[in-house]
Image (cartoon, rainbow, N blue to C red):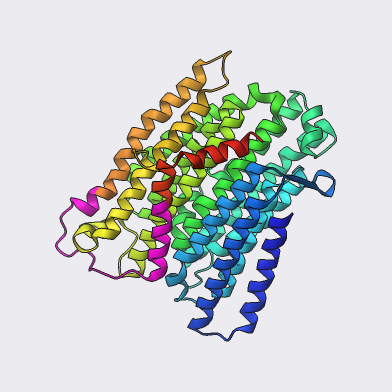
Amino acid sequence: MIPEATLVLALIIVFCADFALHRSERKGFVLGVLTGALLICQMVSCLLAEPATAFGGLYVTTPIVSVMKAILTAGSFIVIVMAQEWLKTTRYQGEFYLLVISTLLGMYMMMSSGSFLMFFLGLEMASVPLSCLVAFDKKKKESAEAAAKYILVATFSSGVMLFGISFVYAATGTLYFDDVARQLIATPLAIMGMVFFFSGLGFKISLVPFHFWTADTYQGAPTPVTGYLSVVSKGAAALTLAVILMKVFTFMTDYWQPMLYIVIVLSITIANLFAIRQKELKRFMAFSSISQAGYIMLAVIGNSAAGIAALTFYVLVYVVANMSVFTVISAVEQNGGSTQMSAYNGLYQTNPKLSLLMTIALFSLAGIPPFAGMFSKFFVFMAGVGGHEQAPFWPYFVVFIALVNTVVSLYYYLLIVKAMYITKEEHPLPTFRNAKSVNLSLAICTLGILLCGVCSCVYEWISSAATM
């Protein structure tokens, strides 16, 4: 448990530093540098971690889980960097860093769980600090409203999930994943348990029809928190759900695959249609994230190691592309703009470099070559149609619907590009100079988008970890 132990140590160091340093602007900078350095060390510890089991099987880690931990830690580091300018407006910088690290620790425990009990504890360890982050901007009632909706939905989804876990326990008499997989058969009780469990976790990933909280929460939360919520928590929940479906409910594939077909088609299609109508960028990105969640889960229907590799690579690309978009949104918001799409009219006239980086990120999210998003979608589509020799029609149909929706998503992503480059504006947002932290965040994200698109070694490394 080296990654978890080092993260707990980082939590203690930041907590003590927050008390020891005098409250000033310098304090926030020192804490930010300290947290960033600790997260970089944490990424290294994740990549060096060996497969292990602890606490009688409650804790289990594998190479692909270690890779996902490193990816989510990198996403957390980007959030810390991009939030520096926004944190200057609040007195509670230390609390922000502590909540981010606490949430990350909960996600670690959730992904490394070997039992439904450890999984649920990790999930709640991540959800409670996340709700505090959503409510972090106490001066805005929208932030409090977003947090209230998030807490209510999280509580309800946790109850639904626990209801399903109790059914699984009643059917098998155990909560350990390996024991459940050996004893579980497709009885009505077990099927109901699987459905309720999937529904509860569907709320966390914001899959349709469990997505109603997403747009309001994303809009009301501070922009860096929205970015964190959209990529890091989604990636952890998606990998955990994929592993549990393939490992625990492996003998119930004929039941959960059709359920996934329906949810994926609904998530991608409905989210794309609603995204077209949005004029507020954070709501726009909320429906984009719902659609992206459908693409992520597309890798699971193949029920193979290739699907886990495709899912992990998709999350990696999604982290850098989505965080690049949210960094630009935060920069515009901090420099006199707003989160309305109209604020980006004519942005290229005054801030051409920022517009270019925003375009690259949007093109990657849309899946336009040669950017990384095209390859992540390709691998997901390939994983979705793999391993279905007996009944190939439905997987191919779902992938076809996803391909059609890729064209639709290209249209609404280009709406922002059109606003920046084509739409005429007499008084566009004035030219402004980005803070060094914003430039660093954009540099990391853009470099990730480009490198993941041209360096095949990244996917090969992830694929090798998935098959170990």
Range drawn in magenta: 418-447
Which quadrant of the view contains residue 202?
top right
Residue 83 at x, y percent in the picture: 46, 67
User: Which percent across, then down, holds residue 172?
Assistant: 82, 32
Q: Residue at x 62, y 60 (%)?
A: 42
Residue 280 found in image quarter:
bottom left
At 47% from the left edge and 56% from the top edge, which residue is drawn? 227
Is residue 419 shown in magenta?
A: yes
Q: Does the magenta run of residues contain 426?
A: yes
Q: Return the residue nearer the eye: 196 or 122.
A: 122
Q: Quadrant of the N terminus?
A: bottom right
In the image, taking residue 354 as reference, residue 71 lies left or right, namely right
- How many badges with numbers are in the image? 0
- Closer-to-camera residue (419/262): 419
Q: Residue at x 49, y 69 (%)?
A: 137
Q: From the viewer's perspective, tell me whether residue 161 is left or right of residue 87.
A: right
Q: Is residue 437 above or below residue 186?
A: below
Above-or-below relation of 120 to 297: below
Residue 234 vs residue 186: left or right?
left
Q: Is residue 162 visible?
A: yes
